[in-house]
Structure formats: C-alpha cells, structure tokens
C-alpha cells in the first residue's frame, strides 16, 4: 500500500517561520517518523534551506516563478528552491493565483530539474486540463471552504468524487483534497472518497498540539486507504 499524501501548508502564520516554524516542523517530523509516512510541508521561501537541512520532512515552496535566470527582481526560480534543498512547490494556490501559461512554464521547468509540482485548482472541472500539464499532483480546494473549519469532504463530497473521476483520465497524476479539513473524520472521508491524500493548513498551524492533530490525520488516512485496498 502506498502511503497517503499528507501536505501541510504553512502559509504565512506567525508560527510558519523562524524559531516557531522550526519547532512545529520538528513536531511534525517526529510524527511522520513514528508512522513511517512522509509528510510534505509547504513553507515560506525563507525556511526552505533550514528545514531541508535539519529535518527529514519533504520541503516544498509555496510558489515558484517558472522564469529563466536574469533580471527578474523578486522572483523565486525553481533552481533556487532546489539549491536550498526543496523537493518541489505548490503552484496556483487560491491565495497565490497565477496564469495558465505561468503554471505550465513552472511545471516544465520544475520537472526538468527534478522538482515535484502540485498544482492547485478550485473546482473539479479544472482537474483534467491541469492534469494534462503533468504535474505530480493536483490539489483541489474550494476556496470558500479554505480556513472555514468546514471540510470539503463533508460539505462538498461531490467535488472530491468528481475530481477523482477526472484524475483517472490523466494516469500518473495524484489527487489531493483540501479546504476546511479539521478532524480525523474529515481526512478519513476524503481518502475514502478516492483522494490520494489531504492538504491542510489552519487545523495544524493553529493547533495547541499540532503533533496530535497530524498523528490523527495520518492514522485516519491510513485506515481509509486500508479500507479501499
Ligand atoms: O493548502 C491548504 C489550505 O489552503 C487549506 O487551508 O486552513 O482550510 O486547512 P485550511
């Protein structure tokens, strides 16, 4: 059984960077090791180097610019992420939308240098068209549920089931579901509905005991995968 995809998006919370960002990462790493399930953390660009060097987490950027080297002030190039030890990046998150051609350029550039890409979509109708760009995974998140505490798997299960139908048309691309995921039950349901894993932010980043939350999420994802197999 392949492990579930557990993607934790640090976003730009007060504890997403610096000493607090490091602390929460060590807690997540501990749980990941206990369960033997790799965890992807999408972190602020300033944290990629430290977390890649000092933890065994799979460290991603939250965004990259698929541009060539040169006079591009403020850009984060795939090569920079790779050089810092990052293994991939999110692209087109609802909070960091980019144009379709920019997504395509970034996916191509990342693949060329061996970085993984996870393209976000806000509706199942885009799963196939983004899927044919051949990212490693699509992360589907209805924007109205992001940070709401109301999980996509409960409030809009049809978004996941329809996305699962669409992803089957692009073999080799994984489907991850996110938005509002708060409980182990939300995770179980998302995976039971056919997602390969989950994307989460606030439930972990704002938790008093993030390690317990992550443990519960991994546990439920594993249970649901086992039931599916
Ligand atoms: O990328 C994951 C994120 O957008 C979901 O946010 O706070 O609803 O778990 P949240």
Image (cartoon, rainbow, N blue to C red):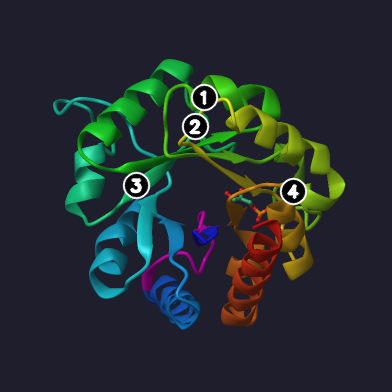
Q: Earlier in the sequence, mark 4 or mark 3?
A: 3
Residue 78 position by quadrant: top left
28 and 127: which one is in front?
A: 127
Relative image position of residue 64 (x, y in whole percent): 35, 37
**Which marked residue is nearer to the observer: mark 4 or mark 3?**
4
Callout 1 secondary element: helix
Separation of marks 1 and 3 at Cα, in angstroms: 17 Å
Tell me residue 77's x, y (percent).
25, 36
| Quarter location, residue 90 | top left
The residue positioned farthest toward the front in the image shown = 229
Residue at 24% from the left image edge and 42% from the top image edge? 114
Which is nearer the N-term, disc 1 or disc 3?
3
Magenta stretch bounds: 7-18
Comparing marks 4 and 1, which lies closer to the viewer? 4
Disc number lying in front (3 or 2): 2
How many angstroms separate mark 3 from mark 2 (CA)? 20 Å
Q: Quadrant of the C terminus?
A: bottom right
**Residue 116 point in image, percent of width and height:** 35, 43
Local secondary structure at mark 2: loop
């Amino acid at each position: 059984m392949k492990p579930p995809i557990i993607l934790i998006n640090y976003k730009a919370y007060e504890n997403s960077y610096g000493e607090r960002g490091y602390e929460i990462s060590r807690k997540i790493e501990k749980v990941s090791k206990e369960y033997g399930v790799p965890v992807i953390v999408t972190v602020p660009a300033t944290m990629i180097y430290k977390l890649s060097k000092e933890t065994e987490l799979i460290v991603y950027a939250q965004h990259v610019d698929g541009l060539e080297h040169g006079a591009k002030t403020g850009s984060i190039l795939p090569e920079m992420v790779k050089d810092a030890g990052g293994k991939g990046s999110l692209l087109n998150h609802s909070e960091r939308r980019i144009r379709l051609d920019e997504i395509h350029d970034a996916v191509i550039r990342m693949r060329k240098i061996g970085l993984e890409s996870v393209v976000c979509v806000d509706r199942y109708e885009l799963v196939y068209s983004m899927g044919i760009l051949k990212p490693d995974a699509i992360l589907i998140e209805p924007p109205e549920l992001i940070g709401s505490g109301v999980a996509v798997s409960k409030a809009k299960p049809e978004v996941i089931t329809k996305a699962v139908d669409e992803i089957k048309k692009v073999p080799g691309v994984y489907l991850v579901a996110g938005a509002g995921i708060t409980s182990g039950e939300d995770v179980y349901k998302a995976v039971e509905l056919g997602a390969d894993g989950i994307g989460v932010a606030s439930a972990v980043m704002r938790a008093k005991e993030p390690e317990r939350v992550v443990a519960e999420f991994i546990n439920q994802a594993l249970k649901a995968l086992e039931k599916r197999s």
